[in-house]
Amino acid sequence: MQKSLRKLRKSQTGFSLIEIIMSIGILAIMSIFIMQMYIKAASLKEMAFDKDYALSAAQTALEVYKSHGPDPENWLNAGSLFSKEAVVNRINESSNYAVEYYYDKNWQPANDKPAQGYTLRITIETQENIILPGDLIQTEVSVIRIHPYLLSEENNTILCNLHSGSYFPFLLSERT
C-alpha cells in the first residue's frame, strides 16, 4: 500500500508553465467580452434614463403649453421645468417659431446651450402672425441630447418627439 501511495505522489505534478500561460490568455480574452458587455449595459442604462426623463419633460412642456396658451411668457410661471433665460428662435421668415430651453448634463436649467446637456424645443406653427380665437395650432415638442453616448459618435440625438394640435378659444396678442 505504501508503494502505491508513493507512485501516486510521484505521478501527481503541478501545472506546467504553458498551461498557466494558456489559462491567463483565455481569461484575458473572456474579460474583454465581459468588459464590453458591462460598458454596453451602462450605456443602455443611461439611454433609458434619458429617454424616460425626456418623455416626462416633453409631456410636462406640452401640458403647460396647453394650459397656459402659446405665449412663452406665460410658461415661465408654470414651474421649474422652464428657465427664465429661454431662447426664442425663429425657424424661418414665416410665422413659425421655436422656443428652446437648455439643460446641463444633470437636467438642471442652463442659461445657454451647454457643451454637454439637453435642449427642449417647442415649435409652434400657425397660419399668420396673429393667433385668433378658434385657431388650430400645430405644436411639436422635442428633446435633444447634445453630446454623444459612450462608445457612440452621434451628436444631437433626438430622445423624444411629441406632436399636438391645440385649439385656443381666447384672444392672444400679436407675436413679434
Image (tube, helix red, strand yellow):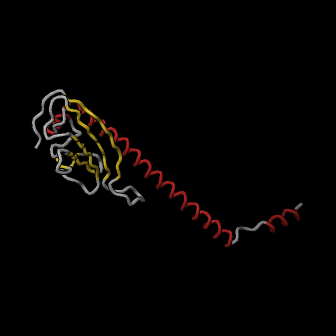
Task: Report the number of numbered marks.
Answer: 0
Tell which of 159 and 47 is nearer to you: 159
**Vertical comparison of 34 with 69: above or below:** below
Image-quadrant location for residue 172: top left
Image-quadrant location for residue 138: top left
> What percent of the width, then of the height, locates residue 102?
23, 48
Extreme-top residue of the structure? 169
Tell which of 66 and 170 is nearer to you: 170
Left or right: 124 as drawn, with respect to 48: left
Q: What's the residue at 18%, 36% (across, down)? A: 70
Left or right: 4 as drawn, with respect to 100: right
Tell which of 35 and 162 is nearer to you: 162
**Vertical comparison of 150 with 69: above or below:** below
> What percent of the width, then of the height, locates residue 131?
15, 35
> What percent of the width, then of the height, locates residue 2?
87, 62
Left or right: 143 as drawn, with respect to 101: right
Extreme-bottom residue of the structure? 17
Query: Which corner quadrant holds the N terminus?
Result: bottom right
Tell which of 78 and 159 is nearer to you: 159
Q: What's the residue at 21%, 46% (across, down)? A: 98
Query: Which corner quadrant holds the C terminus?
Result: top left
> What percent of the width, then of the height, locates residue 169?
18, 27
Q: What's the residue at 70%, 71% (across, down)? A: 16
